[in-house]
């Protein structure tokens, strides 16, 4: 499995962003196999999206002598100007077909045919060697099935388990997010104090608050990191702790969160594969 495969999956599973032309949801369409009117292939496409990045399951089915056949694929791609190439990342299964035969499918190239509505698609179903069949589809649902969500989630976990076993250092933006806690707070100032559990080791971290960098490459082996948060936004606020260590694949960090007379303590383990995530939900006044 290639390292670059689906590094954008993390954000895709964690959240969903609505854009002007959003393809997230369920699409149903068809194409004529090898342009033959005798063999119509039905296709179901289920997609998740974040910031223009898509991942999903494409299922094709046909019938021959009352026997169903086809393939299920895990696909992904990025949308540009209403166009997207959903490339095959993995053959999930074959129905009355071998995975080897299923692998002749390369990508599904799609174009939105109605500006800003994203309810109809046209495109090409590409086979190995650049041969293709014309494809059309309509949107039938805005939410994908729980089964598809589970399949995508399982694939991601397998992928990152392999990364962890191989001790691969991922870029911070490509790491999973390990949720530490969700804490209800009020609107007053919050003091964060980060310290290293393993004294003397180069435990360097960066910290983001609601996407803004509030501490950059701070070496905890030299001194603890103290940050004061002011004016929390209504709703959910997030703190992301990123390991900047190259020597250690996983850090052990103590976080003290103080608000007024209340102190909460957390143990964080950011590393090569995971960032630590803490959610602060501000109480309604």
Image (cartoon, rainbow, N blue to C red):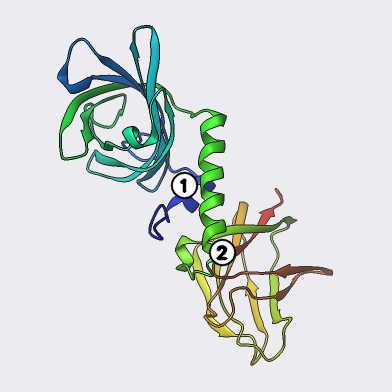
Q: Viewed as shown, does residue 179 lie left or right of 6? A: right
The secondary structure type at the circle numbered 1 is helix
Residue 101 is situated, as x and y percent measured from the top left of the image, at 32, 33
Residue density around tag 2, few if under 14, some if 14–19, many if 20 or more, within 10 Å: some
Where residue 33 is drawn, which disc sits there? Answer: none
Residue placed at 21% from the left, 35% from the top? 126
Residue drawn where x is 59% and y is 56% of the image: 233
Query: Residue 10: where, in percent of width, then height?
Result: 49, 53
- From the viewer's side, name the closer residue of 1 and 122: 1
Q: In front of the other: label 2 or label 1? A: 2
Q: Is residue 197 left or right of residue 173?
A: right
Q: Is residue 150 visible?
A: yes
- N-terminal of the pair, mark 2 or mark 1, is 1
Q: Residue furthest top?
A: 66
Image marks 2 and 1: residues in contact by CB distance under 8 Å: no
Quadrant location, the N terminus: bottom left
Looking at the picture, does residue 261 appear above or below residue 22? below
Label 2 sits on residue: 164
The Cα atoms of the two marked residues, 2 and 1, are separated by 20 Å
Whole-percent x, y for residue 102 in the image: 34, 33
User: Where residue 37 sits in the image (x, y, percent)?
Assistant: 18, 11
Residue 59 shows in the view: no
Mark 1 lies on residue? 12
Task: Name the secondary structure under disc 2.
Answer: helix
């Amino acid at each position: 499995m290639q390292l670059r495969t689906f590094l954008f999956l993390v954000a895709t599973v964690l959240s969903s962003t609505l854009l002007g032309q959003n393809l997230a949801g369920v699409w149903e369409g068809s194409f004529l196999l090898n342009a033959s009117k005798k063999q119509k292939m039905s296709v179901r496409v289920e997609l998740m999206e974040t910031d223009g990045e898509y991942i999903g399951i494409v299922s094709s089915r046909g019938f021959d002598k009352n026997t169903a056949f086809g393939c299920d694929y895990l696909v992904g791609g990025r949308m540009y100007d209403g166009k997207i190439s959903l490339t095959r990342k993995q053959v999930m299964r074959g129905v009355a077909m071998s995975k080897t035969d299923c692998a002749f499918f390369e990508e599904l190239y799609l174009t939105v045919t109605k500006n800003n509505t994203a309810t109809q698609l046209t495109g090409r179903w590409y086979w190995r060697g650049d041969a293709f069949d014309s494809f059309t589809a309509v949107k039938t649902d805005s939410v994908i099935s729980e089964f598809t969500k589970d399949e995508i989630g399982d694939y991601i976990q397998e992928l990152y388990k392999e990364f962890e076993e191989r001790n691969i250092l991922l870029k911070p933006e490509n790491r999973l997010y390990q949720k530490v806690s969700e804490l209800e707070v009020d609107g007053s100032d919050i003091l964060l104090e980060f310290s290293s559990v393993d004294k003397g080791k180069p435990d360097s971290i960066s910290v983001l608050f609601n996407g803004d960098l509030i501490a950059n490459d701070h070496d905890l082996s030299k001194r603890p990191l103290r940050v004061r948060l002011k004016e929390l936004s209504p709703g959910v606020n997030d703190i992301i702790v990123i390991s900047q260590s190259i020597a250690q694949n996983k850090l052990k960090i103590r976080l003290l969160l103080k608000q007024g007379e209340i102190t909460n303590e957390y143990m964080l383990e950011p590393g090569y594969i995971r960032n630590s995530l803490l959610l602060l939900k501000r109480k309604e006044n």
